Amino acid sequence: MTAAHEQRRLAALHEYELLDTPAGDELEAVVRVAALVAGVPNATLNLIDESRQCQLTTHGFEGSDTARSDSMCAVRFETGEVTYLPDAGLDLAFAFNPWVTGLLGRVRFYFSAPLVTPQGYALGSLCVFHTERHELTDEQIARLKDLAEVIVALFERRRQARANAELASEVREQHEELEVAHADLGRAHAEKKATIVELRRSNRELEQFAGVVSHDLAAPLTVVNGYLELIEERVARADPESARWIGSSTRAIGRMQRLITALLLYARAGHAPCRPEPAALGDLVEQALTDLRGSLDGATVVVQPDLPTIDADPTLIRQLLQNLIGNSLKYRRPDRPCHIEVSARHDGGQWRVSVADNGVGIPKAQREKVFDMFTQVDPGSGRGHGIGLSTCQRIVDRHGGRIVAAETPGGGTTVVFTLPVGQHAAAVS
């Protein structure tokens, strides 16, 4: 992990203002449930800062801060993957840790699920452990992951509540300023000030709404889905009709989760800060493909080997590429293998980036409308919500470019978007 990424991670951690503060009843309850789900006596919510592990709340033992160098959770939490050790003494990365050797504890069974923010920064982990060897089922592991997501949702809700309070304070201050402006400069100037305040308020409220949708709705849906799966396992054989009802509910939750995610990405694409920087387009394509690896299903993706360095916000462009490649994978033709090509060329002061596929294609009459919100080429297919391409257009607009859809020779869709050429244009031209 680079030093720059660690600095951004620490900034994200401190933004939540969680360190050295009371955990609260909700977080304490989640940690207790984690121990119950795992079937072990001990659980803890650990946050990792520059030099220490802060145990925000614990169950089954009295928590305390320890050095980051002694922390078991700090060993792998930044990977974003769970750590599951039925016997920590058998893993060389943990066997000599003071929590295992007896210096600080005698941990044998150890499991931790990282607490990852929507921006991808690991703040710490939800950890369950035991002084005896212990094993978990796949179902227990899945539910512990769900609980880690619920914890992040509670973190976000606290942050949003604090942001709302700050917004209320700002509105009061702006109102006072407006009264002064009205008295000193007259009605016209006051109305202009009011318009500016209203725009700021609307933008802040939209961003806060996106956060609430993401966590206060999406995270509980994940938990409900998990418990539906548990119930389905128990009734599937004894009551097939109930199992069918549960299956329908689970699919409905899945559709709602996908819609919430798409709406959140759309809101962030228009209102998140756009911070252009030199970024290797080829690396962004590879990152997008890594995120989509579960959807490739035999598809061939050909990436131009000499993709340029661009001046753009890497997070937004990665999201753009993931949406476009994901659409190509989603709308493949059943009668031939899916083939996707990603390329770029320098064209008169701008980069033209193309994502071409051999899928079902977009009728000519709909190629402009598909970038409108909630527009679907085939509404009856149930394969999308009509938000993805609208999000793509928002991202391209933020960068001062254009995006169009055309036909791929031989059938399929080619989406082309442009980005202005910055100081790195000569890298590959």
Image (spheres, rainbow, N blue to C red):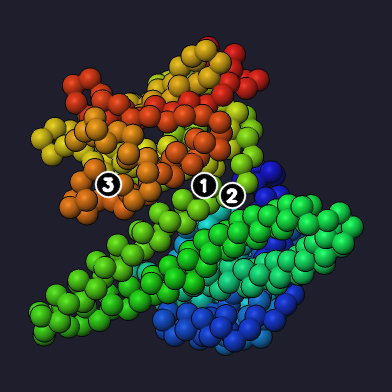
Q: How many marks?
A: 3
Amino acid type of the residue tagged 2 in the rendering? Ala
Instruction: Look at discs 3 and 1 and give the one toward the viewer.
Output: 3
Q: Are marks 3 and 1 in contact (CB under 8 Å)?
A: no
Distance between mark 3 and mark 1 Cα atoms: 20 Å
Depth check, front residue: 250 or 121: 250
Amino acid type of the residue tagged 3 in the rendering? Gln
Distance between mark 1 and mark 2 Cα atoms: 6 Å
Can you tell which mark lies on residue 269?
1
Q: Residue at x 60, y 28 (%)?
A: 311
Residue bearing the label numbered 3: 376
Distance between mark 3 and mark 2 Cα atoms: 25 Å
Q: Is residue 36 left or right of residue 97?
A: left
Tell me if I can see residue 279 in this picture: no
Q: Are marks 1 and 2 in contact (CB under 8 Å)?
A: yes
Residue bearing the label numbered 2: 272
Residue 209 place in picture, x, y as percent: 53, 64
Graded by Cα atoms within 10 Å as few (under 14), some (14 to 19) or many (20 or more), the crowding at tag 3 reads: many
